[in-house]
Image (cartoon, rainbow, N blue to C red):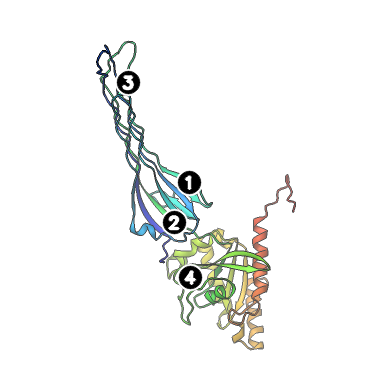
Amino acid sequence: MKFLDLTKVYIRSGGGGAGCVSFRREKFIEFGGPDGGDGGNGGSVWAEAVEGLNTLIDFRYQQHFFAKSGQGGMGAQRTGKTGEDITLKVPLGTEILDEDEETVIADMTTVGQRVLLARGGNGGWGNLQFKSSTNRSPTRANSGQEGVERTIWLRLKLIADAGLLGLPNAGKSTFLAATSNARPKIADYPFTTLVPNLGVVGIDGHEFVMADIPGLIEGASEGRGLGDQFLAHVERCSVLLHLVDGTSSTIAKDYRTIIHELEAYAEELADKPRITALNKIDALDAKTLSTRKRALEKATGGPVFLISGVSGAGLQDVLRAIYAQILQGRVVVTEDEPWHP
């Protein structure tokens, strides 16, 4: 399945059916009077968040969604049939934007959430509705209200508890494969990962979702490489795991490159809790490892985990730290209502 996280969609709700002009003409009934029915309402266009989807690829093959129009009214006081609604099924985490790609119409974050995108037009009144004491035989009826036509954008931001960050070839895919049920592509060249991958990670009987974001490079926030396309996916993460390649000779520079791109893209990302880990320690001797750990600690101003996605060294410790940070983000404590276990 191909990954698609941004697409344009054209929608139109159904127009209302026209009202009917009709009079009763039955044997032995004098002065039958008007009996034109109302037109049916047009169908509406809805969006619904569903489980089991993690891409917008279905909208690449169908971009136009038009609801049915209402049926016109009929004689004998018969109302026209209401047009059928149409529902766009989108993955969790989908943002629905207006045509300007900035105004957020809705943020689909819970299963079953439904949002009305375009309301169907009302059906027109038949001539029966215009009967009065002074007009016993009205000959007018309303036409139905026209439907709403608009262009919207669907932008998917994957919902994950933790996100993996790092330069290309920092070992993010290897880490995800070693700690979860995901099977991302792994190779010894940069930009192996071209789309985000999700994996369910288990630690001490608990589970959380981790997202592997394609590698960032310097200038990613300005559109260089692939990073600008996928940085949005880490906005929903509670904590970020920053992997630094231990075999690199420019440890501190590599770390600062990623931090700079986060700050340039959005301040909210830079303010998110981060855990830093020096990866590929299985390829380093003790002296080199000690030197590069000190350099990274100096650059981060905090603790650094030593891990290896290949040998499995240190993975359990860093996963426990990630899960603890996720729990901390889920607990909201207020002065008026203290939290109790």
Which of marks 2 and 3 precedes in the sequence?
3
Report helix, strand or loop for mark 2: strand
Q: Quadrant of the N terminus?
A: bottom left
Q: In which quarter of the image is the C terminus?
A: bottom right
Q: How crowded is mark 4: few (under 14 residues within 10 Å), some or many (20 or more)?
A: many
Left or right: 171 as drawn, with respect to 205: left
Q: What residue type is labelled 4?
A: Pro
Report helix, strand or loop for mark 3: helix
| Disc 3/disc 2 C-alpha distance (Å) | 47 Å
Which residue is tagged 2? 155
Which of marks 1 and 2 precedes in the sequence?
1
Which residue is tagged 1? 114
Which residue is tagged 3? 128
Q: Position of residue 62 (x, y in %)?
A: 34, 55
Left or right: 67 as drawn, with respect to 300: left
Q: For the point 39% across and 39% down, which residue is it?
A: 119
Which of marks 1 and 4 precedes in the sequence?
1
